[in-house]
């Protein structure tokens, strides 16, 4: 079999079980592809020795006949997940040299299932960003290009390295995290599938925190079936994470029947934004028609507090970030600034943080500290929490009325060029999250599925939002949408 790195998880799993290929062969094909794709800057810490060691162990396990679905499958791990003995920097200078003595619960569960870690993937610093331009490693690059234009495009953020690596077939799948759209937006920008599960479905233990009430890990894969296979391995109750749900994890793949007859799909009128590109509008309408043709009932719904979601998110997330990032002080681990004679502890804190944190992280920490300060706590933070409750109730009301899933665009545009969104106006960048942040505020599962190309040949995604804890049902609706859309485009290889 040639081009082994181009296989999906499901195809590779079946080939491994049939004895057509070994995990070592799959892993070597991916390692070769990674080494030939440095220009994409997707993998930032390569771990070939660990990968080959795990691949050999996986082959033994498959031979013995007791291998779970993920056994032997080569994947990438976002740099936000702590991996024992391997640099885990959250793409920040302040964690320079940090090699954890422990493994995050999600990456441990994948390792226990026999998955092969190829290395750590690029991302926005501390997961703060929508374009992978805030990373200490430099920009990750989207393998897609506009027509015949050579301009480098963003793979989205913050899981930009994960999206780029999966789209360019450097790994079969990757882990991502989603605080306000950081799995779904890059998945849409690169023509892959990405699911953010219900808050609490995957353990957050050992994942470097950004905003603790919003962060959630999930898989980024080539197909919906792959997302179902990988999500099952990542989920499960973890006593080390107090927000982890003590719920049984279903066999998500077994729920992919593609039958959505009689399902009610809601179309929220509030997501029809002023100035939405005609291509996004058309894709959304086409998606609704595809689901209708598959037997679903399309209903108009209202989520009245949607317009307050972005402002509420950009109060709550920075507030939680400012608390979480207070631990980076140069004392216990990571980077410490060079101190002048006579400098005390205050100077050490100030110099370490000024050197260690990038501009976007500094901006969000300052915003967060401001909204939590004594005179502004009620005016900003408490008010944003109340708005969040109203947004959550909007969704609860819609689901109580019998709606099974909600269909929206995943992003307000296709991938834009690196450097096109200027540092001068961060709000423009924040608007990229307009369709995704409500899902995090309400703690719901959401999935992005590639559904078409824009006029310049770039992928566009549609988002489905599901009921809490019903990822299986959501994946099945996404599977029906994927089948109807028939998206098979791949980026032309230029790297």
Image (cartoon, rainbow, N blue to C red):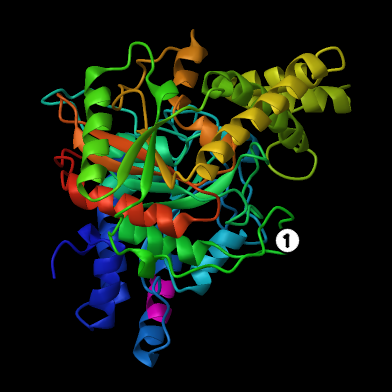
Q: Which residue is drawn at 52% across and 31% down?
A: 437
Picture quadrant where residue 74 is located: bottom left
Residue 189 visible in image: yes
Q: In this view, does 391 lie to the left or right of 120?
A: right
* Residue 13 falls left or right of residue 438: left
Residue in the image at 14% along x and 40% along y? 492
Element on which disc 1 rests: loop
Rendering coords of residue 213 (x, y %): 67, 40
What is the quadrant of residue 432 in the picture?
A: top left
Q: Is residue 85 visible in this depiction of the protein?
A: no
- Residue 236: image quadrant is bottom right
Which residue is at the far left?
A: 148
Q: Nearer the viewer, residue 184 or 342?
A: 184
| 198 to 39, vertically: above or below | below
Tell me: residue 429, above or below residue 99: above
Is 266 left, or right, of 361 in this rendering?
left
- Secondary structure mainly formed by the magenta segment: helix
Residue 53 on the magenta segment = yes
Tell me where the magenta segment starts and ends, as one range.
52-58
């Amino acid at each position: 079999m040639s081009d082994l790195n181009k296989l999906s998880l499901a195809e590779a799993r079946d080939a491994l079980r049939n004895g057509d290929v070994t995990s070592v062969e799959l892993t070597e094909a991916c390692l070769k592809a990674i080494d030939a794709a440095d220009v994409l800057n997707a993998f930032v810490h390569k771990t070939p020795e660990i990968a080959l060691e795990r691949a050999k162990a996986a082959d033994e396990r498959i031979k013995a006949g007791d291998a779970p679905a993920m056994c032997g499958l080569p994947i990438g791990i976002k740099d936000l997940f702590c991996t024992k003995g391997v640099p885990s920097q959250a793409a920040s200078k302040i964690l320079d040299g940090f090699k954890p003595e422990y493994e995050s619960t999600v990456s441990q569960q994948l390792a226990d299932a026999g998955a092969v870690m190829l290395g750590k993937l690029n991302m926005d610093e501390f997961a703060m960003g929508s374009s992978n331009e805030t990373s200490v490693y430099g920009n990750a690059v989207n393998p897609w290009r506009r027509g015949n234009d050579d301009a480098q495009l963003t793979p989205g953020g913050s899981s930009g390295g994960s999206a780029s690596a999966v789209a360019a077939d450097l790994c079969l799948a990757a882990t991502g995290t989603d605080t306000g759209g950081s799995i779904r937006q890059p998945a849409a920008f690169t023509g892959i599938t990405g699911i953010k599960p219900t808050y609490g479905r995957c353990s957050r233990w050992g994942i470097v925190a950004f905003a603790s009430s919003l962060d959630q890990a999930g898989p980024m894969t080539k197909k919906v079936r792959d997302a179902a296979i990988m999500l099952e391995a990542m989920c499960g109750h973890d006593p080390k994470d107090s927000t982890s749900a003590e719920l049984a994890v279903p066999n998500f793949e077994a729920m992919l029947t593609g039958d959505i007859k009689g399902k009610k799909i809601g179309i929220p009128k509030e997501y029809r934004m002023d100035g939405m590109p005609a291509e996004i509008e058309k894709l959304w309408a086409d998606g609704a028609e595809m689901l209708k043709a598959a037997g679903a009932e399309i209903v108009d719904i209202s989520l009245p507090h949607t317009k307050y979601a972005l402002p509420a998110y950009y109060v709550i997330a920075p507030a939680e970030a400012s608390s979480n990032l207070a631990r980076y002080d140069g004392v216990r681990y990571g980077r410490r600034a060079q101190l002048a004679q006579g400098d005390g502890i205050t100077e050490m804190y100030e110099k370490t943080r000024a050197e260690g944190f990038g501009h976007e992280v500094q901006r969000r920490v300052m915003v967060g500290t401001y909204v939590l300060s004594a005179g502004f706590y009620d005016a900003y933070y408490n008010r944003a929490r109340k708005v969040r409750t109203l947004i959550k109730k909007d969704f609860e009301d819609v689901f109580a009325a019998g709606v099974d899933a909600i269909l929206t665009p995943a992003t307000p545009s296709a991938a834009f060029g690196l450097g096109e969104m200027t540092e001068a106006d961060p709000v423009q960048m924040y608007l990229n999250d307009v369709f995704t942040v409500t899902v995090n505020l309400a703690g719901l599962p959401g999935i992005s599925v590639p559904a078409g190309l824009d006029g310049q040949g770039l992928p566009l995604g549609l988002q489905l939002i599901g009921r809490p804890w019903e990822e299986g049902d959501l994946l099945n609706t996404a599977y029906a949408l994927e089948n109807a859309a028939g998206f098979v485009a791949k980026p032309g290889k230029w790297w």
